[in-house]
Image (spheres, rainbow, N blue to C red):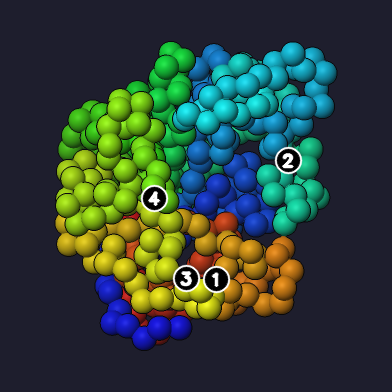
Amino acid sequence: MVSTPREKPLAARVGVIGHRGAPAWQPEHTLASYARAIADGADFIEPDLVMSRDGVLVVRHENEIGSTTDVGERHEFAARRAIRHIDGVAASGWFTEDFTLAELKTLRTRERLPQLRGTAHDGQLPIATLEEVIELAAAESAACGRLIGIVPEIKHGTHFRQLGLPMEDLLLATLAGHAHTRTATVEIQSFEIGNLRYLRERLGSAHPNIRLLQLLDVPPAQPYDVAVAGGTLDYARMMTAEGLREVAGYADAIGPELRAIIPWNADGHLDPPTRLVRDAHAVGLEVHPWTFRPENTFLAPVFRRGDAPQARHRAGLVAQIDAYLDAGIDAFFTDDPASGRQAVDAHVRAGEGESSL
């Protein structure tokens, strides 16, 4: 561990975001996963959004569903296997935009990382819609006496727009149609830029509960909408002090990968924090990094226990999160919200203060 001055978060209380629910314990993006995240203390749940052929927002990490559902075993859908270029990369499989919602609802989900997380829940759970996630959040909020926020991600916005299935206005209409999402905090996220700028114009100041999060991929990657337009802006430039000032013109927060905040050195320990949190805070941006996971393979080596990649070391995860809390993050994405809740609560008890969206 490094000894460095502790940065204070901008937010009043650090937010625990159930990344795709609680996928360390239930298949990601299922209602069971979101319910587990809430029960384990998540302040927010994160549905990734893609589109069905008939224009419904469904919840999947990718529009390619061959690896996360049983569609490959469904003979009636065999002819729909295709090769598509998604954000400039060729992908082979089955894609949500080729299925109606009714057809998608006949499928059952599978674990995306079976070598690490097993297959005990395969074949049991249906694909969820955004509407169902909102209804779950509303019901659980009433049951537990606290408002559960939602952090939806627009996946492959340019791709779906090119197919005539734009998500942005439909997302706003869906949020406006539910009492829960008119009051609870909603933070819309995207790796692209144009859709966040569009949403900022549409939202204005009339929806104070809706915030925008600019996701930042690992350099030298570019936002896909910038690449399609022939632009040169990349995520590395967006993470400079000047780039962050630009982002602050339309977003409320940034979502970088963990090591953009605290690099892991060759010895497996953590280096001192970079300037990213300080520079973001200086222009009024909160910082919500991704993704804290309990398995050894995802932990910095200093926090691992044993050699098995799939072994879970929750105490190590709590310790790793604590280092990032010292760096001043305002919220964070985690596959194990119970460990995230433990880390935040312990940090508060230690006198470091709380923070949130």
Q: Nearer the viewer, residue 288 or 352?
A: 288
Q: Circle 3 sits in a helix, a strand or a loop, which is it?
A: loop
CA–CA distance in space, label 2 to label 3: 32 Å
Q: CA distance from mark 3 to mark 4?
A: 16 Å
Q: Which residue is mark 1?
A: 300
Residue bearing mark 4: 219
Residue found at x 62% / y 75%: 304
Disc 4 residue type? Pro
Q: Count residues near mark 4 (Cα–Cα under 10 Å), then give few for <14, some for 14-19, many for 20+.
A: few
Give the foreground label among 2 and 1. 1
- Amino acid tagged 2: Arg
Circle 2 residue: 110
How far apart in space, not on screen, are marks 2 and 1 (Cα)? 27 Å
In the image, what residue type sits under mark 3?
Trp
Residue at the image point whose x is 54% and y is 14% from the top: 54
Label 3 or label 4, whichever comes before in sequence order: 4
Question: Label 4 vs label 2: CA separation?
Answer: 31 Å
Q: Are marks 3 and 4 in contact (CB under 8 Å)?
A: no
Residue 308 visible here: yes
